[in-house]
Image (spheres, rainbow, N blue to C red):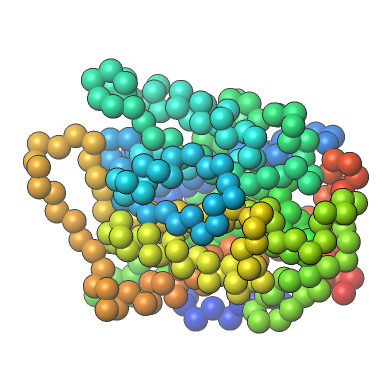
Amino acid sequence: MGLPENCALNLHAKWPRGARNLISDVPGVTVGHATINEGDIHTGVTAIFPHQGNIFRDKVMAGASVINGFGKSMGLVQIEELGTIETPILLTNTLSTGTAHEALTRYMLEQNEDIGVSTGTVNCVVTECNDGRLNDIRGLHVKEAHVREALESASADFAEGAVGGGTGMVCMGLKGGIGSASRTLQTDGETYTVGALVMSNFGEPGNLVIGGKHYPTGARPCKESSEAGKDKGSIIMILATDLPLSERQLKRMARRSMIALARTGSYCGNGSGDIAIAFTTANRSPHYSEKNILDMRYFYDEEIDRVFEASVEAVEEAIVSSLYHAKTMTGIRGNTYPGLREFLEKC
């Protein structure tokens, strides 16, 4: 998936794409969606599994970067403190974070009878963007069953565009959504992968840039007068890799997602919540251990630029892919946002 090789919007990647060109090119990573498209309801849930084992007992090292904090995500504080993720990562709409968190908590409790009894509680990670321009967000339509559907449908092959948590999202005056891409790099005789998945809901109409070319998406697609001249709405950027990185290096990797935002035309406006989370499947932190001193590998900092560049490329393509795969949608209050391909046909 990602962008097709013959796409006119090819970003001419410096680093090779993975086999699927999806975040799931990182071995063990899977993604599932639950999509709700009913009348004025356009929303859903996307779930990302860092690996296929018990994530609570076998945590992945992680780092997060709050590029702009106009957001209501849950679980970032403990990532910042401990540098680990111990649950799947959920993406949904802003007012459904509470429901998603409770549903994910129940899911984790079912799998781990020790949580809250013989050990501590669990840090569920839930991220969000405001899909209220197309979705009846006040209706609180995401239910626990939708979270379960996203979790239980997770696969290495998954759809992009207006699906899952990205169903009702808007980006740069166009229809936004879920996008993904991957890059591979070789080091020390081995091939490694960096994968990205985004939920795009950011940017000022008219500012879109793809491969250095400006696309005037400023035609007023929305009936709401507050739309013009605003970079708002948010983006969630998830980075996964099988490279052995420390939590410090993962935080640095996540922070550089901002470069991909700038490349696509964002300036991280006041009303935009821009959050990046990066994790590695190569370094794990066991919940239980008979040893107090654990081994961990990490990348030589003087050569880490290649990792940063591949990461930025993956996020940039994931953003463009989220637009490329999304189709024109008319939502609540008659607001209509064109898909990128339909917009290009009319340019």
The image quarter in which residue 132 lies: top right
Farthest residue, direction front: 270
* Percent of width and height locating residue 174: 78, 60
The location of residue 323, given as percent across then percent down, is 70, 61
Q: Is residue 200 visible?
A: no
Q: How many marks?
A: 0
Rendered position, 78 above or below 66: above
Q: Position of residue 321 (x, y in %)?
A: 64, 63
Q: Residue furthest top?
A: 117
Residue drawn at the location 74% of the way across and 78% of the way down: 214
Q: Nearer the viewer, residue 254 or 145?
A: 254
Q: Residue at x 87, y 58 (%)?
A: 221
* Residue 90 appears in the picture as rendered: yes
Along the horizontal axis of the image, is 25 left or right of 119?
right
Q: Answer with left or right where residue 266 lies relative to residue 310.
A: right
**In the image, is residue 180 above or below residue 93?**
below
Horizontally, residue 126 falls left or right of residue 235, namely left
Position of residue 286 relative to residue 157, above or below, is: above
In the image, residue 231 lies at what x, y percent?
70, 61
Rendered-image quadrant of the C terminus: bottom right
Q: Residue at x 45, y 27 (%)?
A: 105
Residue in the picture at 49% in, 39% down = 74
When asked about the image quadrant of residue 213, the answer is: bottom right
Quadrant position of the N terminus in the picture: bottom right
Location of residue 135 (image quadrant): top right
